[in-house]
Amino acid sequence: MVTANKEKKAQGAARKLLEGGQARMSLLASLVDSSEDAIIASTRQGVITGWNPAAERMFGYRAEEVVGRPIFLLEGPHRQGEMAEILEKMGDGERVGSYESQRRRKDGSSIFISLTVSPIYDPKGQLIGVYSINRDITERKMVEIRYRHVFETAGDGILILDDTGRIIDANPLLLDLLGYSGEDLKGEMLWDIGALADVAASKACFMDSSKRSASVMRISLC
């Protein structure tokens, strides 16, 4: 009788563990399916094994169209070999983390993405695959590209400063006017630069600008 009771308790405990594991798996699947970010899983060789609804919306492929196919079909035109390099690094135990890249959609168009790549391990701790969380940043990148074009072609010399007055960037016209290279200026304080070395005037200009704008400022010089 004692042995029978022990077996029942053991079976009950095992059933609870199984049910708990199934509940956690169900919750995880629900989170992946409802995510606004595209979540893609693949083997360590790059064969797609997981593809959530957000990935369908982002890349234009249905899950049944891509599961079992190589993930490299998503590589952007100027990013050939990038994914293979990432998989190789992870296979060697290197951490990849987050980075920005470019990918190709089913219709052939390109999108900019921010992604985080993480390993998938089996119960023995062996790497069996990777998964990535992908976010579409195309709109932001296009704004940056347009801004960069305006910055580099402006008819005024422009400095970008942080909130302490330290130089972050300068456009080509200003570099020509001052006779500096970009690397010479970056990291310097506004009032320490030769042509701007009127300390009192430069600091006053900076303080006045900082009251009226964000911590990163564009200052146009005539």
Image (spheres, grey):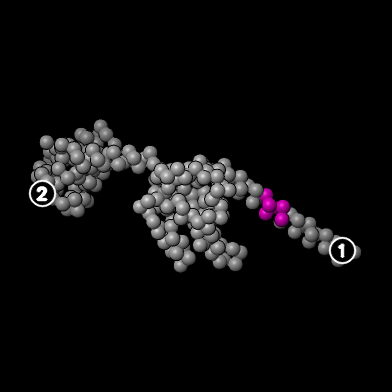
Badge 2 vs badge 1, beta-carbon distance below 8 Å: no
Determine whether, in the image, residue 56 is placed left or right of residue 189.
right
Label 2, label 1: how many angstroms apart (C-alpha)?
90 Å
Report whether residue 119 is seen.
no
Q: Amino acid at mark 1?
A: Ala
Q: Which residues are magenta?
A: 18-23
Q: Residue at x 60, y 67 (%)?
A: 124
Nearer the observer, 189 or 115: 115
Q: Residue at x 22, y 40 (%)?
A: 151
User: Is residue 35 magenta-colored?
Assistant: no
The vertical placement of 104 against 212, above or below, is below
Determine whether, in the image, residue 68 is placed left or right of residue 217.
right
Nearer the observer, 9 or 19: 19
* Number of numbered tags placed on the structure image: 2
Nearer the observer, 136 or 97: 136
User: At which x and y percent is residue 35?
Assistant: 54, 43
Q: Residue at x 57, y 66 (%)?
A: 125
Dot placed on the residue nearer the N-terminal end, 2 or 1: 1
Mark 2 Cα within 10 Å, few/some/many (few <14, many 20+)? Answer: few
Q: Which residue is mark 1?
A: 4
User: At which x and y percent is residue 191?
Assistant: 15, 45
Q: Which residue is mark 2?
A: 179
